[in-house]
Amino acid sequence: AVACKKDIYFQNLDTRIITHLCKLKSHGRPMSIEWCFEEPTRLGLGTTSGSIQVWDTVNTKTVREWKDVDWDAVGGISWNGKILSVGVEPGGIGFYDIREEKAVGRLTLHKSKVLGCKWSHDGNYLSSSDARGVVYVGRAGWRGPDQ
């Protein structure tokens, strides 16, 4: 998948067909996109206005959308099963289950905006980085200092 201005496109690598998934109208510009490994037709999308969306690429429809009024642009996003982990302002990582309407958790370790987060392939470790260059790596279930 690729973002081009406010448009999101993806290519089916078996058929080589390129599909226009969406054009963001009122949600800012795309900031982060990530395929769900567990459900490869689902795409997570974070925007410059703090909107987090999950798209069904077969039907080209939004499955779920979350927005927190305190957030600016979404940083990195990463899937762990049905949970989408999202780097947000100011220094937090939000956890969203596609089956739930609201966040299911939040971790605050960083002192500045989280620009990246990534789960290990086995789903046991989450790494995150922020605008100040600080990187954390934690085991799933770890809540961090004083958390």
Image (spheres, grey):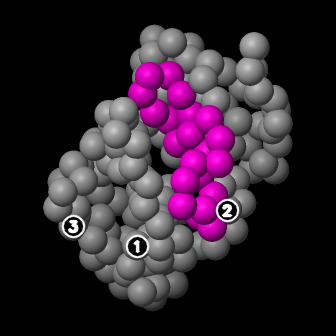
Q: Quick one: label 2 or label 1, which is nearer the N terminus?
A: 1
Q: Position of residue 69 (x, y in %)?
A: 34, 39
Give the labeled residue for mark 3: 23
**Magenta stretch: includes residue 96:** yes
Tag 1 near tag 3, CB within 8 Å: no
Give the SS element for disc 3: strand
Q: Quick one: label 1 or label 3, which is nearer the N terminus?
A: 3
Q: Residue at x 50, y 22 (%)?
A: 91
Give the SS element for disc 2: loop
Q: Is residue 2 above or below residue 133?
A: below
Amino acid type, callout 2: Lys
Q: Is residue 105 above or below residue 8?
A: above
In this picture, residue 92 sits left or right of residue 81:
left
Q: CA distance from mark 2 to mark 1?
A: 15 Å
Dot label at residue 62: 1
Query: In the depicted view, which residue is nearer to us: 134 or 93?
Result: 93
Q: Position of residue 94 (x, y in %)?
A: 56, 40
Give the SS element for disc 1: strand
Query: In the depicted view, which residue is nearer to us: 143 or 126?
Result: 143
Q: Quadrant of the C terminus?
A: top right
Give the labeled residue for mark 2: 82
Q: Quick one: label 3 or label 2, which is nearer the N terminus?
A: 3
